[in-house]
Amino acid sequence: MSINWFPGHMHKAQKEIRELLPEVDLVIEVLDARLPYSSQNPLLQKLRGQTPCIKLLNKSDLADETLNQIWVNELQKDETVKAYAVNATDTGLIKQIPQWCLNWFPERAANKKPIQVMIMGIPNVGKSTIINLIAERIIAKTGNEAAVTKRQQRIKLKGNVVLHDTPGVLWPRFDNQNSAYRLAVTGGIKDNIVEAEDKAFYLAEYVMVAYKDLISKRYDIESMPLEPYDLLTKIGEKRGALRSGGRVDITRISSLFINEFRLGTVGRITLETPEMMYQELAEVEKQLAAKAAKKAARKARPKGSR
């Protein structure tokens, strides 16, 4: 199955971001710590240039602690980026964000010129919760579903920081289908776009290798099966997710498995590593080059030839 995403308001949101970027001093991009690569907006990577960027790895309490630090170090290889692992329960850390913005522009303390900051992030990444915590009041609507913020907002923060909120933006096409599936697993793509079974099979295939011990302990599985279907069947049997006749209800256990992952009750899991990112970027580049070559070959054919 190939995943693509075509909500109409996303084009409007992208246009707003393009127009606002030249006016801001700094960008805050809220990422999902469980998928720091797949939750980065490629549009921002192209348009930001040398504008400083703070990348917040949110929901870090749900992600692999070791990989949190590895990803912070990886993202900070770009000299224009500072990265921080944060989560909504550590309110003291999140309230430091305005000061992190000020640290980029120490001269502003003297000249009193406001620091214009744009905050952005994919749907359901927790951006609105972060805004409410740093503003210390309810500014942005929060919700456990994709695309809650619908319009741009301007918020004055302590320390002469002006925050421009933008709607959660996903890109209209996924060149990397692995990223698309990871976003579906975490809830970055609305649940009605991808079947629960497809998400659960993708997640199971990854964790039964990368987090074998965690899964064995959580679901009391002595011998790890080789196939995702067999793992979900075993979990379904343990949980009593059965249809009449004793067969496992795969749809029901798939939804339960995904929900337990999202809540962190399975354990702290990160779905990608920097090594995976580089490998997938190389694969996507090859695929796009092959597509471009095919297109060029078609254009070069004489008219009327097959």
Image (cartoon, grey):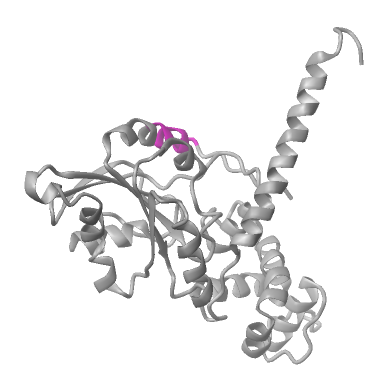
Residue at x-position 62% and y-position 44%: 174
Residue at x-position 46% and y-position 33%: 11
Q: Which residues are magenta?
A: 8-15
Hey, which residue is sitting farthest right in the picture?
306
Horizontal and vertical percent position of residue 156: 16, 49
Horizontal and vertical percent position of residue 47: 43, 35
In this rendering, the answer to whether 218 lies above or below 2 is below
Near-viewer residue (255 or 24): 24
Left or right of residue 104, residue 156 in this image: left
In this rendering, the answer to whether 61 lies above or below 50 is below
Determine the main secondary structure of the stretch shown in magenta: helix
Is 9 magenta? The answer is: yes
Left or right of residue 138, residue 216 in this image: right
Residue at x-position 41% and y-position 51%: 79
Is 138 magenta? The answer is: no
Horizontal and vertical percent position of residue 163: 23, 48
Tell me where residue 112 sits by quadrant: top left
